[in-house]
Image (cartoon, grey):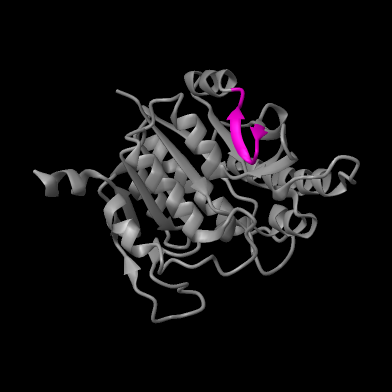
Amino acid sequence: MSELVFVKLGGSVITDKQCPCTARPELIGRLARELKAALTAQPQLRVLLGHGSGSFGHIPAQKYHVRQGIAPGADWWGFVETGAVAARLNRIVTDLLLEAGVPVWSAQPSASAHCEGGRLFSLAVDPIRESLDRGLVPLLYGDVAFDGRQGCTIISTEELFGFLAQAMPVRRMVMVGEVDGVYDRDPLAEPEAVQIPRITPSSFRQLRAQLGKSHAVDVTGGMLTKVQAMVALVSSDRVQRVHLISGRREGALTQVLLDEHACGGTVIEQVGERQERK
């Protein structure tokens, strides 16, 4: 039986977020090869892939406040610049995946996405479904979007995943970042930060005060917002398990794709809560 897994390559790991428009091709290439290894080892595995914008889209998005929208009659330059640099990173990622032998098909979210008040309300899902049915790996990315209330906004990969989880039978997600999971503080700024191996909806209510923002520019809200989005997904029962791992840990992506109980990183799930209530 085939399994569908959503995988995000975070902007923190595929780019240098301290240097504008700086990709990490060697690291992206290795992650592409790890994905290819998992697909080869498990031919029934289906992957919907996404990536963040990192030092590409987040910089102009913050400069022009694109997520907050554009007033009537205002200049739309920030919107088009943000979309252009996000697409530039997507081209780099796509080419490296193809080089690794991954049958990737890139789908531009802004071509069909529509938002209202900063929330994603519609997206063309059928082409994504068909690409999966054909054995392809559809690739989405954080992008600009038109918004009926505020003109425009930014849609993150997590928001795209959350929307698609309502339309597709996905059971688990893998989020690949710079650090190995979730910590009580930013481990890149504070080496004494402690890793949190598992988060449930109940424990998140206690942990959220400890989770700060990510260490660089992130117009989609940093680590706290990302974890909150994943907790909401497992709480809704649309997704059972989210695994957050480091892309710098060699072989980790292949391992977790082939074994959902692989060690390392942080797991967000509701299973433990249900067992505790029994």
Identify the residue at image location x=34%, y=48%: 256
Q: Which residues are magenta?
A: 115-124
Examine the rendering and report whether any part of residue 200 can be seen. Answer: no
Closest to the observer: 126 or 119?
119
On the rendered image, what quadrant is the N terminus found in?
top left
x, y percentage for residue 158? 52, 44
| Vertical comparison of 172 with 221: above or below | above
| Vertical comparison of 171 with 15: above or below | above
Direction from residue 272 to residue 63 in the image, left or right: right
Closest to the observer: 183 or 48?
183
Identify the residue at image location x=29%, y=47%: 269
Q: Residue 96 lies in what quarter of the image?
A: top right
Q: Number of marks in the image?
A: 0
Closest to the observer: 252 or 56?
56
Direction from residue 30 to residue 252 in the image, left or right: left
Q: Is residue 260 magenta?
A: no
Q: Residue 180 lies in what quarter of the image?
A: bottom left
On the rendered image, what quadrant is the C terminus found in?
top left
Examine the rendering and report whether any part of residue 170 can be seen. Answer: yes
Closest to the observer: 275 or 182?
275
Direction from residue 236 to residue 223 in the image, left or right: right
Identify the residue at image location x=53%, y=46%: 32
x, y percentage for residue 16? 64, 64
Identify the residue at image location x=73%, y=43%: 87
Direction from residue 112 to residue 203 in the image, left or right: left
- Magenta segment's dominant SS is strand
x, y percentage for residue 185? 43, 73
Q: Is residue 119 magenta?
A: yes
x, y percentage for residue 212? 48, 68
